[in-house]
Image: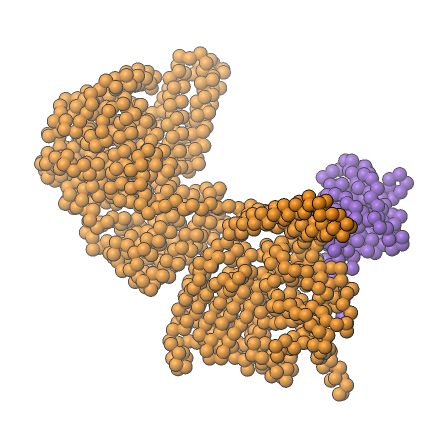
Chain colours: A orange, B purple
């Protein structure tokens, strides 16, 4: 069952974890024994598993679980992270990725995982052969088990819960036994356990031992309270274990009356006793239910059960039968609903039948005024059998009504009694056993005590989604603390250490009493051990969480080592965008204030000219001064604000760089090439939006570099290059830009082939091509449809890639440069502004209109004399440091009126480039440099036009932002067309 | 397309009083659903956008947003007559989220009409206007109110724009 509302979060979280995992996996290839990496992988997969279980994704959690097992072996050094294993891990990671994609698309897990799990189990299987004590490998959930746990009780206490197989149980009990046959083991155990007192005194000596036992008890107890269906059997097992131990200890331990009042003991006893009667339990599906959901389910069940009981009790005598029935019905409906939610079909059916009966009797009631109540009691009994935990009272009484009243009175009594009870101390172990037999009185008490405990545990259960690393010590402490608090609730002034011991002993003694009954039951549960393992694996996480419930700082710090809460929040990108917009407005306003300041000083000047004296001018001057001060302050604040908001959007390049090792790995493999990827400057930060936009272009470039650039190893050797090609990704800041370089040491771009191709495509004539610089020629590779590849491969060759790259980069106001030397390698250089929303720009004026040129594109501004410009092929050009640069008049391009008349003195030229091409734009005047906020233009103004947007300048007017890339294209297109036309003309003329 | 729009509108507010903002271009009276009108402003400084379709007058700065302004007269190819008024009205319309300004000669008043009095656009030209831009016509106080289909107006202008660019690539 999948919880859809959580799915989105899961998909997002899983994506991140998978990325992290992949990075680590690839790194693991080179350093297979790096524990830190293994831990990272483990963490990632564990996060996924936890989330998957929480959401209810069976396949994902099963697969990730199997992965965890394998990783655990690697981590413990039991297995070497061979390439083979890493490959399987990568495969598994991909599979999870597929599952996540499935979920994203269709909200169901479609991809099969069993084959992979089987594969993983092969590795796990090999491992477990070496460990005779762990024989369970049938289920994919196997060894969480540290090596040393067989011999150490405290650890066993911990790990038992997740790891049990019959062998383990026996080994736990007998410390060495490995008998397959449980019953025989039992007898053995009894024999072996003759020296119980020594066993017990051992416990006394080491608190840890005891507390570990305690935690074991506690865990079992928790199992009981969490009522997992599978755990019915488990409870048997657990209580059996206790009894077993107790059997051994029987003679030497005597218990005080008070011990029996311990909630733990009572719970345990009750449950174990009850389970004996639960032969006809419903078979509930034993999938791995989400613990939290189950906790909630059980909480509700308990609540409703109490309601039902009360109602049923009153029904007999009450005059308001109708209302009571309605209450019952309501409770049943909600129970049915929750059962249905948990997909307990049998249970739902059961409730359904019950509801029908209640409905029937409701009808009867209206007709006859009287109804039979027996069925309600029957149902309640049945429900108790299914969920034995509901039965807080010995089921010997015949009617629920009686039970209820009994329980009520006795509970009150007990509550009153408790404070008077004597403090219990550890050393009090030599106590009388006599009270074992008069437990009846205390059993009633559990009604309260158990529910207390239950609340605690279920809340712990709720918190159990959080992963924690598991060590035995914290858990013991936690349980100690838990017990402590339980105990405190009961107002028994004991120290926590004492509690541990006493409760332990109590539990043991109590369980002991029940042992004969459970003995014959033992075989059956053990057969079910496999099922239990499923449920138990989750348990390991749970106890540690308890520390969050209990205010015990010591345990908190200890239980969560190395798990620092990440101080990050997920924010809707829209919110940041809107904040960014506001900041943009502020920047515009600031510019407006600057404008005002200028006007004030102009006013000042004007007043001066009109003949105002210095005295009269003084207030104006003071005001102007203060005003400019205020503006400076405003400017500073708004700058900081702007930077701050920008930083929110900034993410390290590592975000995309980290995807590439995998890409390189894959592409290299498919092309039979050997490539090492070097990544530099991944900490360089870039606007998130841009990061997303450049991921694709970068991917193309890397594919190209490997696919076309780097040669196959044999060729490389022939050429005298190192066998393994190298690909370098580097990012660094350059003023307001980020530069990303992709460098390979491959064969480089074959200029000659480019020429041939260009000629074929009739882009230019041979002579023109010959005249072009290599740089101009390499730029052709970015033209649509231009490919020098001889054949089209799966990854590249259609001549689309670089075209797309260029488009994408230029969309970001970025530039792309290609440097290539045949046989030596290629370097692609992307230069991208750090952000898109606010850019520094140069404002120029043409006629009455002002235009904005992104400073990124501006190379320099020149004042040019008329005579410096000459005409070449119908285009005005000028010589700039020995190179010709074409010059275009913006006024002419845009059909505007210009103040500049052709042939009148000097004018301004702004040299702009798009990385590869350089042109000069002739403008009337330069206004200045400003930070402008880019605002989008309507699509029909934006497309096919040379404006990338508009901005509002200080005086509130609009200035259009030139799209230099489009502008250059436009001009070159024009040139080419003109050229073609001319050629055609000359051709025609010749003919 | 036009029919689709009308059909949808009809079903939603059948037999209902609808309010139209009436405006004039030349002598003709046009109407636009009041719900589409975001605001009406008097002449704002318009920034010319070079190389844009002819009917695009430019862009204006409306409280920080840059909004294209279309000269409806040119857009609809209406006769240019006495159009030289200093004080234009600009109707700011929200057309499916695309905020666009339309220059009209005069905004008259809000006209209330019954939805069912709207007739489909006649086949023949109305006021020299192609019927594709007309959502319907309606007689109000002896004058013909032409309800314009602004969705269509913006839609076609894309086509036209493309044509415009193709026919007429950057005049030299």
Q: Is residue A254 above or below residue A828?
A: above
The C terminus of chain A: image quadrant: bottom right
Residue A681 falls in which quadrant of the image?
bottom left
In the rendered image, residue B5, in percent from the top left (x then y), is placed at 73, 47
Camera-side residue: A818 or B8? A818
Camera-side residue: A92 or A624? A624
- Would residue A809 be visible to someone looking at this image? yes
Residue B168 falls in which quadrant of the image?
bottom right
Q: Is residue B47 above or below residue A884?
A: above
The residue under the point 27% across, 35% down is: A479
The N terminus of chain A: image quadrant: top left
Left or right relative to A334: residue A591: right
Q: Is residue A744 above or below residue A634?
A: below
Residue at the bottom extreme of this rendering: A990
The residue under the point 48% across, 46% down is: A570
The residue under the point 28% across, 28% down is: A486
């Amino acid at each position: 069952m999948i919880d859809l509302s959580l799915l989105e979060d899961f998909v997002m979280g899983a994506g991140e974890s998978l990325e992290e995992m992949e990075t680590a996996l690839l790194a693991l290839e080179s350093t297979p024994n790096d524990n830190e990496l293994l831990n990272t992988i483990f963490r990632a997969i564990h996060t996924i598993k936890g989330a998957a279980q929480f959401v209810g994704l069976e396949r994902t959690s099963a697969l990730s679980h199997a992965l965890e097992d394998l990783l655990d072996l690697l981590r413990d050094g039991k297995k070497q992270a061979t390439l083979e294993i890493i490959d399987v891990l990568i495969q598994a990671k991909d599979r999870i990725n597929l599952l996540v994609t499935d979920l994203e698309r269709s909200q169901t897990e479609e991809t099969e995982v069993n084959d992979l799990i089987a594969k993983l189990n092969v590795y796990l299987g090999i491992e477990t052969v070496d460990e005779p004590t762990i024989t369970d490998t049938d289920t994919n959930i196997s060894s969480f088990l540290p090596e040393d746990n067989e011999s150490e009780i405290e650890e066993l206490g911990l790990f038992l819960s997740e790891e049990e197989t019959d062998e383990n149980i026996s080994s736990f009990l007998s410390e060495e036994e490995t008998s397959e046959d449980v019953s025989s083991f039992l007898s053995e155990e009894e024999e072996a356990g003759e020296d119980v007192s020594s066993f017990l005194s051992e416990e006394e000596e080491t608190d840890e031992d005891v507390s570990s036992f305690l935690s074991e008890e506690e865990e079992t107890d928790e199992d009981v309270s969490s009522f997992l269906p599978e755990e019915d059997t488990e409870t048997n097992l657990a209580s059996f274990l206790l009894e077993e131990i107790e059997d051994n200890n029987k003679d030497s331990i005597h218990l005080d009356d008070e011990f029996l009042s311990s909630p733990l003991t009572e719970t345990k006893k009750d449950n174990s006793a009850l389970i004996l009667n639960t032969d006809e339990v419903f078979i509930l599906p034993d999938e791995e239910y989400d613990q939290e959901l189950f906790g909630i389910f059980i909480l509700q069940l308990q609540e409703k059960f109490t309601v039902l009981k009360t109602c049923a009790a009153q029904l007999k005598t009450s005059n308001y039968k109708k209302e009571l029935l309605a209450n019952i019905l309501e409770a049943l409906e909600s129970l049915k609903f929750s059962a249905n939610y948990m997909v307990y079909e049998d249970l739902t059916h059961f409730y359904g039948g019950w509801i029908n009966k209640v409905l029937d009797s409701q009808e009867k009631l209206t007709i006859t005024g009287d109804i039979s109540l027996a069925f309600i009691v029957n149902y309640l009994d049945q429900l108790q059998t299914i969920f034995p935990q509901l039965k807080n009272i010995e089921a010997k009484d015949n009617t629920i009504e009686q039970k209820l009243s009994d329980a009520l009175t006795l509970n009150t009594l007990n509550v009153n009694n408790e404070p008077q009870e004597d403090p219990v101390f550890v050393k009090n172990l030599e106590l009388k056993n006599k009270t074992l037999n008069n437990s009846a009185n205390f059993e009633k008490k559990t009604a309260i005590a158990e529910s207390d405990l239950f609340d605690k545990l279920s809340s712990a259960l709720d918190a159990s989604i959080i992963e924690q690393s598991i060590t035995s010590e914290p858990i013991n402490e936690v349980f100690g603390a838990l017990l402590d608090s339980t105990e405190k609730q009961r107002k028994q002034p004991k120290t926590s250490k004492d509690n541990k011991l006493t409760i332990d002993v109590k539990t043991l003694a109590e369980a002991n009493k029940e042992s004969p009954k459970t003995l014959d039951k033992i075989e059956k549960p053990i057969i079910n051990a496999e099922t239990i393992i499923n449920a138990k694996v989750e348990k390991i996480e749970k106890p540690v969480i308890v520390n969050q419930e209990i205010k015990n700082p010591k345990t908190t710090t200890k239980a969560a080592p190395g798990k620092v809460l990440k101080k990050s929040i997920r924010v809707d990108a829209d919110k940041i965008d809107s904040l960014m917009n506001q900041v943009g407005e502020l920047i515009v306003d600031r510019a407006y204030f600057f404008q005002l300041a200028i006007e004030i000083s102009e006013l000042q000047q004007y007043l001066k000219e009109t003949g105002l004296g210095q005295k009269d001018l003084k207030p104006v001057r003071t005001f102007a001064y203060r005003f400019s001060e205020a503006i400076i302050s405003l400017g500073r604040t708004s700058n900081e604000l702007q930077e701050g908001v920008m930083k929110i959007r900034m993410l390290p390049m590592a975000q995309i760089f980290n995807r590439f090792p995998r890409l390189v790995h894959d592409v290299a493999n498919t092309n039979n090439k050997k490539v090492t990827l070097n990544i530099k400057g991944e900490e360089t930060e870039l606007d998130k939006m841009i990061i997303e936009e450049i991921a694709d272009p970068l991917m193309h470039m890397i594919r190209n570099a490997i696919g076309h650039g780097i040669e196959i190893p044999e060729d490389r050797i022939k050429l005298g290059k190192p066998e393994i090609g190298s690909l370098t990704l580097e990012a660094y800041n350059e003023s307001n830009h980020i530069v990303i370089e992709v460098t390979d040491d491959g064969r480089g771009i074959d200029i000659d082939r480019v020429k041939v191709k260009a000629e074929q495509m009739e882009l230019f004539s041979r002579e023109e091509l010959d005249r072009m610089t290599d740089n101009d020629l390499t730029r052709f590779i970015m033209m649509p449809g231009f490919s020098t590849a001889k054949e089209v491969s799966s990854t590249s060759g259609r001549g689309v890639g670089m075209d797309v790259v260029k488009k994408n980069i230029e969309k970001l106001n970025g530039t792309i440069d290609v440097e290539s030397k045949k046989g030596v390698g290629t370097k692609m250089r992307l230069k991208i502004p750090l952000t898109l929303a606010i850019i520094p720009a140069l404002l120029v004026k043409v006629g009455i209109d002002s235009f904005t040129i992104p400073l990124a594109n501006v190379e320099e501004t020149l004042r040019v004399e008329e005579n410096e410009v000459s005409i070449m092929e119908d285009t005005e050009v000028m010589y700039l440091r020995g190179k010709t640069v074409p010059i275009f008049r913006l006024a002419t391009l845009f059909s505007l009126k210009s103040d500049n008349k052709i042939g009148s003195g000097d004018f301004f030229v702004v040299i702009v480039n798009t990385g590869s091409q350089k042109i000069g734009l002739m403008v009337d005047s330069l206004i200045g440099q400003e930070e402008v906020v880019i605002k989008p233009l309507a699509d029909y103004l934006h497309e096919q036009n040379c404006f990338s947007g508009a901005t509002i300048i200080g005086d509130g007017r609009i200035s259009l932002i030139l799209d230099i890339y489009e502008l250059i294209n436009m001009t070159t297109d024009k040139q080419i067309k003109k050229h073609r036309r001319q050629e055609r003309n000359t051709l025609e003329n010749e003919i | 397309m036009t029919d689709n729009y009308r059909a949808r509108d009809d079903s939603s507010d059948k037999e209902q009083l609808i309010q139209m903002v009436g405006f004039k271009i030349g002598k003709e009276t046009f109407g636009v659903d009041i719900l589409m009108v975001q605001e009406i402003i008097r002449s704002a400084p318009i920034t010319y956008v070079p190389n844009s379709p002819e009917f695009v007058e430019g862009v204006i700065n409306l409280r920080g947003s840059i909004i294209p302004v279309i000269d409806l007269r040119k857009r609809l190819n209406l006769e240019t007559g006495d159009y030289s008024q200093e004080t234009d009205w600009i109707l700011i319309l929200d057309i499916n989220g695309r905020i666009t300004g339309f220059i009209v000669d005069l905004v008259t008043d809000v006209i209330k009409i019954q939805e069912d009095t709207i007739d489909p656009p006649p086949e023949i030209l109305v006021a020299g206007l192609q019927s594709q831009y007309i959502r319907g016509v309606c007689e109000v106080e002896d004058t013909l109110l032409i309800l314009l289909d602004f969705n269509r107006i913006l839609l076609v202008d894309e086509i036209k724009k493309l044509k415009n660019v193709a026919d007429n690539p950057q005049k030299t």
